[in-house]
Image (cartoon, rainbow, N blue to C red):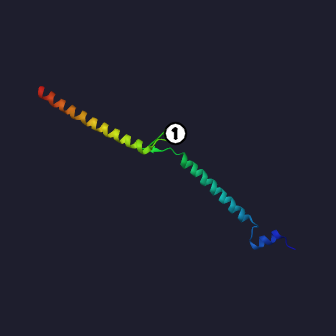
Amino acid sequence: MATRKQANQRSGSSGGLEKKEAIRALAGLAALGFSGRAIIKSRRPRVLGVRLPRELANLDTRQLAKRLSKLAGQIEHASEDVRLASAQTRRVVDRLS
């Protein structure tokens, strides 16, 4: 008389191993999903391509980007004023000499 295990082997059934493997695969995928989510949440925000320190991560990055943009415009305007003043000084010195 054949045992149940031998009968299962002949019919191609693995006796429930496929279910266990499927459950293990699902558990592995769930763990992978949770770890991926943790990695994404732990990323620090960037402003103009520069990572913010962790203690500054709670800042409103859009507001900070606007302020940096405004500051860059002011610096650009000031540098243009300095360039014009320098050129005017050169012209005056050239006329005096």
Q: Is residue 54 left or right of residue 35?
A: left
Q: Residue at x 58, y 48 (%)?
A: 38
Q: Residues within 10 Å of mark 1 (few under 14, many from 20)?
A: few
Q: Is residue 55 left or right of residue 33?
A: left
Q: Is residue 80 left or right of residue 58?
A: left
Q: Residue furthest top?
A: 97
Whether residue 96 is situated above or below residue 71 in the rendered picture: above
Q: Is residue 71 left or right of residue 10?
A: left
Q: x, y (%) of residue 67?
A: 38, 40
Q: Residue at x 82, y 70 (%)?
A: 4
Residue holding disc 1: 54
Q: Residue at x 31, y 38 (%)?
A: 74
Viewer-side residue, 53 vs 32? 53
Q: x, y (%) of residue 39?
A: 56, 48
Image quadrant in which you'd find residue 69: top left
Q: Amino acid at mark 1?
A: Arg
Q: Residue furthest right?
A: 1
Q: Locate the N terminus by quadrant.
A: bottom right
Q: x, y (%) of residue 47?
A: 43, 43
Q: Residue at x 29, y 38 (%)?
A: 76
Whether residue 47 is situated above or below residue 82 in the rendered picture: below
Image quadrant in which you'd find residue 96: top left
Is label 1 in a helix, a strand or a loop? Answer: helix
Whether residue 91 is situated above or below residue 60 in the rendered picture: above
Q: Locate the C terminus by quadrant.
A: top left
